[in-house]
Image (cartoon, rainbow, N blue to C red):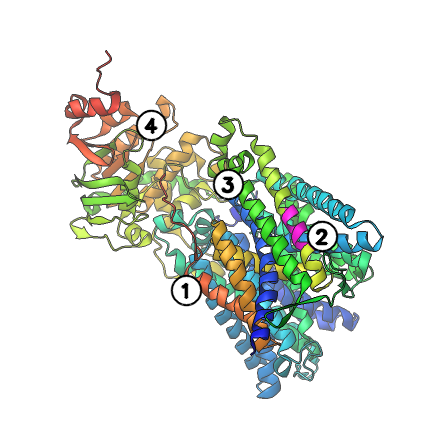
Amino acid sequence: MSDEQSATGWHNYNKIKYVFGLVFVLALPWLPINQFYIFIAQTFCYTAIAVIGLNLLLGLSGQMSLGQAGFYALGAYGSALTSLHFGWPIMLSIVFGTMVAAFGGLVVGTYALRTRGLYLAMTTLAFGYVIDILAQRWVDLTGGTMGLIGISQFEGFGPVSGAAMLLYVSGLSLLIAQLISDYINETRIGRGLRAIRESEVFAASVGIQTHIWKTLIFSFSAALAGLGGALFVHQSGYVGSDAFTVRLSIALLIAIVLGGLGSKSGPIIGTLILLGIVELIAGVHKYGLIIYGSILLVVLLAFPKGASGILESILGLIRKKDTMVAASDIDNASEDIYFALNDLEQQSTSITVQEVSKSYSGVKAVDNVTVEIKKGEVHGLIGPNGAGKSTVINMIAGIYVPDNGKILLGGKDISGYSVAKRAQSGLVRTFQNLQLIEGVSVLDNVLLGIQPQRSELKCFFYWLLGRPTEIPEKKRALSILRFLGILHLVDRLPSELPYGHRKLLELARAIAQGPRVLLLDEPVAGMNSQEAQEIASVITRLRDRGVTILLVEHNMEFVMSICDQISVLNFGQLIAKGTPPEIQSNADVIKAYFGTGKES
Amino acid sequence: MTVANLVQIISSGLAMGSIYILVALGLYITHLTVHKVNFGQGDFLMVATFLMLGTRAAGLPLLVCIVLTLIILALMGWLLDVIAIRPLDRKKSLKIGAFSWILTTAGIALILQNVIELGFGKTAHYSPPLFSTGRDHIVQVFGAGLFFEEILVILAATIIVLGFYIFMFRTRWGKSIQAVAFNPEAAKLLGVNTTLVKTGVFVIASLLAAVGGMLLGPLIAINAHIGLVLTIKALIVAAIGGFANPVGILVGGILFGVLEAFSNYFDSSFGDLYPLLAALIIIAIWPSGLFSERHADVR
């Protein structure tokens, strides 16, 4: 069982590990050990902070950064220079350095909004390079490779030495960083970030404002790198520009790859192994890059889950799978099956596609199409391949912008809304090639769709106290799963489910979003007839509850059996609309599907 | 600034620009076909410069050196695909998702840097010129003393780039590559050996890096770590062309090289940063590149 899943359960108090961590850090300087180990412990703490930041960015959100060393350098110089030149107190300098890095992350993060993976990798690589060059050549500011000396260090406090003070500050920072990282991992923020990692269109379609989330996570990750750098410069009172080359970015990446990308314990384990390797290769420094490069290759190719993944599979053999959902909760869900569906009917509304056109490079894919779907109606949109069905549904969902025309939701013009805003307004969709978060449980996938009931801060304190954070949301999710007849799969992974159940799960997430209008893009494509019947019965029951549904589908038997109204597109034009019997006898429709019949 | 200065600057800008174009075309062809690039493309070039240096120091005839370098780089391209790219296709469920190749190719680059450093040490090396008789072989053009080597580098690069374009757009091979780029499944049905094409593009990219390395070696001081900055600049040149437009790469490479030469002339300490920053800003404003075609996204 992976770290990601076990994180999602109803908690018993499991925060004791942080207390142990705290006690360990507090006690370390008093143990009869060599001062060298205190130094190593400090190094471990500030490095692990930077690695945690990278894990949130790359492991959880899927945003590549090859320039973490740049943010680390911003934090380092931000702190070193203010304390050296302005005489700021150390703590203030460190906070300032962290903020400089966060701001740098915000600026670079704007690239994350506009560009895809390769561009982001390129931009962050170039950013790290630029900072590296500035550190080396802007000698007046940074001292270049000669470096800055005499940066203030922590002073002793009573019996506590200066080195111990730095260890306390770094250790506490690490604990807090790990705490926040765990919180993100285990709650709805993590679900949102994972959705972004799966697909941004998908994330937006469940109402996540991807551009804000991506900038913020970028900035937060940069801030953690900067905090690491800021702590680093106060360790020995010296900082030289050669500390911030691309090798540092690579080393941080190696730590997280070694530890296990996206896992909660990955950064800690990975940093431990990294520091171990650094100490080991000190003797064979000549081969350092060969060792680094080989680690990247071997781990990514042979052990992509990293050390935490290996540990878990070993522990998993010993420990029984944690059940994530208590039996009593399942019983609770059964008491009020329709609790989650009660509000659907009154929310439900009409949707109108008004005189909408769309061309691609001069080809009219959709030509002045008007479709009205009344409240509570199941409306089918059909047509031969290339008729423009997908274009229409994507324009309704906001992925494509129409050249002309309007989309009205309940009479309100939503043409100017983003995908996320449309989703928040109750325009909910499923995808032709279905979209789920693969790494987390069925329950989490449904929870992704549910609006949170509590404020984030309240949620955080509940989580901190070990109390369940999302009881009403989980009840709602369980009810929806029961409604769809897949409650027994609640703690499975989507990858363990057969195709039909995966489709049902996606439908569950869509229902969880509280649709005012439900768009179903080929809901039974690729299904056998029994599975299709299951979906049909769900749709019928949703109609009974007053949900407005627009579906695009090729399976005629399915469409004819469940739709109230049907619109037929051909070559981008609306050629017919009416009830299923009307459509079946419509000459234009028959011509569009079967040709003119002249040969016969 | 005199006319002579101007001609000199443009000449050295064009020479560097043509190297960037060669490296960027390598990134372009693999990105077009398999949507991945070698983050060690610059390091492949670096290896080529040292192979030339080493083989020529051993006293082999120039032609033998060139052929050896080409063969070794072609092998490296093939190995890169076999070791660092293709195995990842079978691991689509990786957490890091679609971008493991960035780290595996970067891993290969690190190994190469280390190997070259072990072989040649950390100091800078100077590769003997390919065309001219010595490093100071100068010809007079418009009253400006130009390095003969630079002019021939520009000429040679132009010929190679022309050859590449003819290969890509006029031959059956090039058409197979484009077919795979457009739709690998359909290309397979049409009888294109997609596996061969997918490996082939990395071999071609490595060969372009080899040519770039042969030409660049005599122009600059080389060491084991010159690859990264070349990779970055080539990525940016390719991005100016939106990774999709070969003409954009041509224009982007020339512009970048010449601007950089001017910028270095006016500010010797930070000159190389300005074009980089300018290009990054351009990419922030036009993420799909200055020259990208608008592709209809019909699904």
- Same-subunit check for callouts 3 and 2: yes
User: Are the residues tagged 3 and 4 within 8 Å (C-beta)?
Assistant: no
Please check whether the numbered discs 2 and 1 fall on a single chain. Answer: no
Task: Name the chain under label 4.
Answer: A
**Residue linked to disc 3:** B169
Q: Is residue B25 left or right of residue A39?
A: left
Left or right: residue A544 compared with residue B87: left
Residue A452 against residue A160 in the figure, above or below: above
Badges 2 and 4, same chain: no
Find the distance from the CA under tag 3 to the CA under tag 2. Answer: 27 Å
Q: Chain of mark 2?
A: B
The magenta region covers B206-214
Q: Tell me the crowding category of disc 4: few under 14, some 14 to 19, or many 20 or more residues within 10 angstroms, Cα based.
A: some
- Relative to the observer, which residue lies in front, A71 or B273? B273
Residue at the (43%, 47%) spot, across then down: A199
- Mark 4 vs mark 1: give the one in front: 4
Q: Which mark is first along the chain, 2 or 3?
A: 2
Name the kind of residue labelled 2 in the image. Answer: Ala
Is residue B207 in the magenta section? Answer: yes
Q: Quadrant of the N terminus of chain A?
A: top right
The residue at which mark 4 appears reads as: A534
Q: Nearer the viewer, mark 3 or mark 2?
A: 3
- The residue that label 2 is drawn on is B48
Q: CA distance from mark 2 to mark 4?
A: 62 Å
Residue type of the residue flagged with mark 1: Leu
Q: Quadrant of residue A143?
A: bottom right
Pinpoint residue B7: horizontal percent, then vertical percent: 58, 70
Chain letter of disc 3?
A: B
